Image (spheres, rainbow, N blue to C red):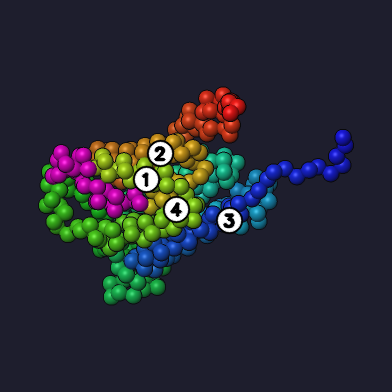
């Protein structure tokens, strides 16, 4: 039988697309981003704009060098989201070149050498943050106390230009450590954890985001709301966030129960640093996470366990970026070992035989 016109396959389309996914993720990030930029004022706004624009520029250069069409890729929002995530992971008053360098590292070294979107092994934003942290530890660990936009102590528009694009002459008078950095330093000086926390730290401040840290550390509540939005719209599944939260609660709860003078409890561990930010917006990256539900549970548990170990026993007070990159490296093994069941077959690949009734 001849078929002059090929028959259409039994295909369907869910309506999902890269641009829709990127738009919804950015919408989920918007409340925490606006609050973080408000908390740290004009310098944070300038750094955010510089980082996002430079990420789009790096994407343009990479596409042109690869001979790929520019508009279909640059308009899907992936480069903009990468720059956005990098800006959220930087100290809000970091100089402009840190944002530009981070964007170029993410796009030109972590994304396009693997043939672009959907092919990279490691999360580009976390590669950028890790390289910057190791290469420029001073610029990446100088935080400022929140100075809400328009408040008496907040820098004005011109002063903010000097901070972001100038020599940073205002930094020394206003720099401070992040919560996790301060706790690790004081524990290293043989102080007791209850005394450290009694000196001014409160769970509400950590959850709401009125403490020093990167823009992505403020606030845990807004980030959680954004994460729930992603779950409700099915942009992400529950497996990685739940595995990360349960693992962190279990480990920190056990260690805090054994020695409350040296180990933070579950509430502090969850609400401090970039843990909630990474739980919903970084670790759930489609490309660099496993494809099966069981694989995602293992991946999430691994990220949380490594984060707890690095925070507690290693030199760095925050370990989320390192943990995600280490678990990214295990994803090919996880996906090779735990494969999705083929329809009509068992998990071992044996065809399912139905006995006649």
Mark 4 closeness class: few <14, some 14–19, many ≥20 residues within 10 Å: some
Q: Give the spatial CA distance, label 3 vs label 1.
A: 26 Å
Report which residue position mark 4 lands on: 231
Specify whether 302 is left or right of 10: left
Residue 290 image point, x, y percent: 48, 38
Residue contact at pointers 2 and 1, CB within 8 angstroms: yes
Report which residue position mark 2 lands on: 297
Report which residue position mark 3 lands on: 19
Residue situated in front as seen by the camera: 164 or 17: 17
Q: Earlier in the sequence, mark 1 or mark 4?
A: 4
Magenta-colored span: 253-276
Q: Secondary structure at mark 1?
A: helix
Residue 339 image point, x, y percent: 51, 31
Q: Secondary structure at mark 3?
A: helix
Q: Give the spatial CA distance, label 2 vs label 3.
A: 27 Å
Query: Which one is closest to the eye, mark 4 or mark 3?
Result: 4
Residue 266 image point, x, y percent: 24, 47
Mark 3 closeness class: few <14, some 14–19, many ≥20 residues within 10 Å: some
Specify whether 101 is left or right of 205: right
Q: Give the spatial CA distance, label 4 vs label 3.
A: 18 Å
Q: Secondary structure at mark 2?
A: helix
Query: Which one is closest to the eye, mark 3 or mark 1?
Result: 1
Q: Answer whether residue 306 is visible to the viewer in this image.
A: yes
Mark 2 closeness class: few <14, some 14–19, many ≥20 residues within 10 Å: some
């Amino acid at each position: 039988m001849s078929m002059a016109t090929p028959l259409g396959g039994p295909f369907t389309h869910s309506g999902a697309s890269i641009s829709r996914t990127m738009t919804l993720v950015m919408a989920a990030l918007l409340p925490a981003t606006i609050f973080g930029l408000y908390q740290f004022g004009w310098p944070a706004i300038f750094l955010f704009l510089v980082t996002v624009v430079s990420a789009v520029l790096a994407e343009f250069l990479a596409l042109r060098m690869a001979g790929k069409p520019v508009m279909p890729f640059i308009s899907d929002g992936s480069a903009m989201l990468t720059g956005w995530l990098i800006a959220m992971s930087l100290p809000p008053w970091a100089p402009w070149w840190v944002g530009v360098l981070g964007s170029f590292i993410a796009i030109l070294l972590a994304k396009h050498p693997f043939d672009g979107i959907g092919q990279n092994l490691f999360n580009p934003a976390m590669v950028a943050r890790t390289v910057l942290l190791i290469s420029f530890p001073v610029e990446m660990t100088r935080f400022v106390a929140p100075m809400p936009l328009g408040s008496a102590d907040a820098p004005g528009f011109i002063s903010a230009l000097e901070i972001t694009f100038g020599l940073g002459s205002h930094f020394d008078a206003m720099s401070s450590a992040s919560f996790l950095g301060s706790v690790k330093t004081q524990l290293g000086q043989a102080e007791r954890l209850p005394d450290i926390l009694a000196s001014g730290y409160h769970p509400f401040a950590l959850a709401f985001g009125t403490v020093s840290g990167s823009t992505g550390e403020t606030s845990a509540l807004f980030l959680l709301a954004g994460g729930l939005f992603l779950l409700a719209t099915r942009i992400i599944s529950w497996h990685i966030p739940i595995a990360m939260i349960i693992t962190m609660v279990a480990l920190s709860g056990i260690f805090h129960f054994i020695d409350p003078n040296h180990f933070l409890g579950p509430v502090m561990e969850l609400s401090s640093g970039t843990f909630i930010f990474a739980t919903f917006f970084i670790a759930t990256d489609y490309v660099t996470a496993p494809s099966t539900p069981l694989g995602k549970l293992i991946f999430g548990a691994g990220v949380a366990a490594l984060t707890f170990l690095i925070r507690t026993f290693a030199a760095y007070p925050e370990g989320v970026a390192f943990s995600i990159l280490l678990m990214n490296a295990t994803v090919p093994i996880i996906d090779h070992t735990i494969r999705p069941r083929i329809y009509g077959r068992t998990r071992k690949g044996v065809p399912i035989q139905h006995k006649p009734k």
